[in-house]
Every structure is written in structure tokens, then in C-alpha cells.
Amino acid sequence: MGAGFAGVGCVRRLERQLAPGEAEIALVAPFSYQLYLPLLPQVASGVLTPQSVAVSLRRSQKHRTRIIPGGAIGVDTKAKVCVIRKITGEIVNERYDQIVLSPGSITRTFDIPGLVDNARGMKTLAEAAYIRDHVIAQLDLADASHDEAERASRLQFVVVGGGYAGTETAACLQRLTTNAVKHYPHIDPKLVKWHLIDIAPKLMPELGDKLGNSALKILRERGIEVSLGVSIAEAGADKVTFTDGRVLPCRTLIWTAGVAASPLIGTLGAETVRGRLAVTPEMNVPGLDGVYALGDAAAVPDLAKGDGAVCPPTAQHSMRQGRRLADNIVASLRHQPLQPYVHKDLGLVVDLGGRDAVSKPLGIELRGLSAQAVARGYHWSALRTNVAKTRVMTNWLINAVAGDDFVRTGFQSQKPATLRDFEYTDAYLTPEQVREHTASMTARG
Ligand SMILES: Cc1cc2nc3c(=O)[nH]c(=O)nc-3n(C[C@H](O)[C@H](O)[C@H](O)COP(=O)(O)OP(=O)(O)OC[C@H]3O[C@@H](n4cnc5c(N)ncnc54)[C@H](O)[C@@H]3O)c2cc1C
């Protein structure tokens, strides 16, 4: 359930390991692609086209898996039935013997007035494409406006969240607007301002002090105003209030302040650790027969770190967990012992756009072009299909030669979609509704 890093990693390995006729595999997936999320900031900034980071499921699977186009909206773990809303809206029940829950995560929000209506996340392809259009639209509208107040609010951009997702997003988009504004004769470039804020005292603490400070220096030198120890008190349609009292005219608020497990996890009524499903190191859910969970949605113990730590929500862990879990499912079908998941973190790569980057592969601190080469090389090699690799490489080459493109493709509707719309957070059934659905199936036999 869920065709992300964890789900696809698991399915591909199952297809290879299971003998024909040994098992049937079904994959519940709302979209026909696996999204390569780490490259989303480059989609938002127009360096990559949306298709290049959407890796086709049909190309990367071996055609043995039945792909069900829809989303799971509930699971009856007693009756062993998954309730699915197909992309047509039709609700169907799917029986299972073993179920792998890998629905990933959604943008974590807080009870801040106006936040869910006025902020956009950076978790889906639609959000990245929307933000790109939205940012270019602000330049277009500011250029055409004679109203100083309107121009001021359209030319200030706020990104909340100083983790790698927010930092990369602010850095890549600031580069886009810096290059684009040269083509807008009525905009004073000094008025275009990007703000990156985080309640924590440091940017990307996982990078360590030296490298984190290098990233901060690069951002500040490029004119991004970084405010640490600060969050949002209120988010309006054309202004944002910071917790330090500043009120900023602004129509672009990008919210990347962490992730929360998919709302599906909360409907199971099982034990959770900070919202993620509690699982054993072998990734089964204690007390629920035939239920496994992994990736961002599950709290998989991090045995390499020990001390009760759980794996951070990263692609690096999710895809490896997928492969380990597939081996465990095969082992359970063959009555062999299961193995725990163990992986020592390989480090972090942060692409700040252009030649700017910081990386820490295997503990080695890199900056500039060498860090950029490691970051891009890592992502490129992790893309699953040769088609995706070719698309991404071609886009990078075109961007290096021809620079950024500032096309607004018209993805914006009259009424801007909200975080809820983009991430389908209201799509799920309550446990009672799940039982009603599965009971009607049992009644029909
Ligand atoms: C901007 C950004 C940058 C990142 N950069 C890095 C990085 O550099 N390195 C790194 O290691 N990690 C990075 N990450 C984190 C990484 O992308 C996630 O940890 C990883 O995608 C989690 O894998 P997953 O399989 O658990 O979830 P996902 O990859 O998100 O996949 C979940 C899948 O389940 C589907 N789904 C959701 N709900 C349902 C449902 N109800 N039914 C069926 N399907 C459903 C979704 O559509 C999706 O396809 C980044 C994340 C973001 C947002």
C-alpha cells in the first residue's frame, strides 16, 4: 500500500524473489508513478520538468504486480481487508494475507491561525508545479501593478522550515527569482526578498556546526534573510506575522516544518511513536497478524544507532527498509526466520542551486562544486529507470547551458488549492466506517 521509496523497493524485491505461483502481489497506488521527492525543489524552481522526477511504475515493475489505481482509506486488520477508494471514486474491498503499509507522510502543521488555508507544502508533484507557477505569477503581477503595497506583498516570499527540504526550496527558488527578475523591467531587484525561518537555533543540525554554518553563509551572501528561533504566529492571504512580532506583506508562504505520518496510520488504532506506527526491527506490527509497516509512516527501530532511536524519515532508509521487508515476507512464506533492519546512515546531500551545495557523505564534509557533484551523482544514481535518469540529466544540462526558464504553465486555478486538497488529508474512513464496509462484503460472501 503506497508506491513510494519503501513500497516500490519492497514490490520490486518481492517480484524478483518470489517464484511464479508462490504469491500474488497487488500495489495500491493513487498515481502511476513513484515520486522522487528529494528533487522536488528543483521542479519548483523550474530546473527539472515535473515528469522527470515522476518515475513510471509500469516501467520499473516487472509486470507481475497488479496495480490498483486508488488510495487505501481504511484497513480492517481483523477481517484482513483493505478498503480502497479508486481514482473513479468507487470504494472497493481488497482481501489480503499480508499487508505492507507504506503510505509515507504528509506535511506536519500546527494550530496556527490561517496556516492550512494560506500555506503550501513541498510534498507532492502538484504542490511543486503549483509553487513554481505561483512564484512566477507574483513577478508577473508585481511587474504589471502600480500599487506599491501590492507590489511589496508579491515580492516577499517566506519559507518556514530550516531542514534540508525547506533550505533547498528557499535556495533554489531564490535563484529562480534572482535570474528571472532581470527580465522584468518594472521590478527593482532589491525589492525581491526571500525569508527562511525556523524555530530551531540552527539550520540542518544533522550537518554539524561547521557545514551548517557554511550553508547559512552561502544563503545570507545570496541575500536570503535567515531568521532562527522564529516561527509564524499568523498566516494571512497577503501578510504573515512572525512570532518575533514582525508583520510581513507576503502572498507566498511555503511550509516545510517537518512531516507527520499519513493519516491512515491513525485510523488503525494501533500503538504509535510520535504518530508513526510502532513496529519491530523486522517491521511487523505487534499484535496485528500479517501487517507490516515501514518508511516515513512507521517508527522502525534504528539498530545502527541503538539507545531506542528510530530511523529518521528519509528516502535512504525507506528504500532499504522496503528491500529488507520483502526478504522477510518471502522468509515468512517459506517458514524461515526474519531478519532485523540495520543500516548505518550514509550522510546528507544538500543542493542549494547552481554551483552551491553542501554534502556530508560518509562523514566527509564537502562544499561547492565537489558537494554539488556528490549531491547530483547520488540522486541521479538513485533514480530507478534509465528514462528518468536521461530526463534528469538532460534537464540539468539544458539548465547549465541555457539557464532557468520562467514559464508559468497555468496550473493555478481561480481558488488556490490548500494543503488539505493537495495532500488528501481528509480522505480517510473512521474505524466504524471501515467495519461497515467490510461487513457488507462479508454479508455478500
Ligand atoms: C522536498 C524533500 C526533499 C527530500 N530530500 C531527501 C534527501 O535528500 N534524502 C533523503 O533520504 N530523503 C529526502 N526526503 C525524504 C524522503 O523523500 C522520504 O523520507 C521518503 O519519500 C519516504 O518514503 P516512503 O516510501 O515512506 O514515502 P513516499 O516516498 O512519500 O511514498 C508514499 C507513497 O504512498 C502514496 N500514498 C499515500 N497515501 C496513500 C494511501 N492512502 N493509499 C495508497 N497510497 C498512498 C503516496 O502517493 C506515495 O506515492 C525529502 C523529502 C522532501 C519532501
Image (cartoon, rainbow, N blue to C red):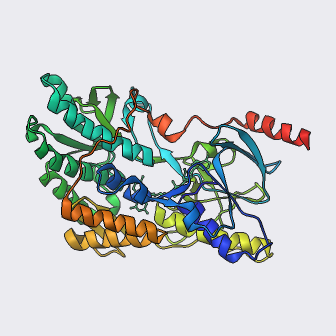
Q: Residue at x 54, y 70 (%)?
A: 320
When the figure is inspected, residue 254 is found, relative to residue 169, above or below; the finding is above
Comparing 221 with 204, the one in front is 221
Q: Is residue 46 left or right of residue 269?
A: left
Please provide percent x and percent y for residue 230. Answer: 28, 39
Please provide percent x and percent y for residue 311. Answer: 51, 62
When the figure is inspected, residue 121 is found, relative to residue 326, above or below; the finding is above
Q: Residue at x 27, y 40 (%)?
A: 135
Tally of marks: 0
Q: Can you say which quadrant of the picture contains the C terminus? A: top right
Comparing 273 with 104, the one in front is 104
Q: Is residue 122 left or right of residue 191?
A: right
Is residue 257 shown to the viewer in this render?
no
Please provide percent x and percent y for residue 240. Answer: 28, 29
Q: Can you say which quadrant of the picture contains the N terminus? A: bottom right
Please provide percent x and percent y for residue 332. Answer: 76, 71
Q: Residue at x 37, y 35 (%)?
A: 412
Is residue 392 shown to the viewer in this render?
yes
Residue 324: which quarter of the image?
A: bottom right
Residue 378: which quarter of the image?
A: bottom left
Comparing 236 with 338, the one in front is 236
Q: Is residue 136 left or right of residue 92?
A: left
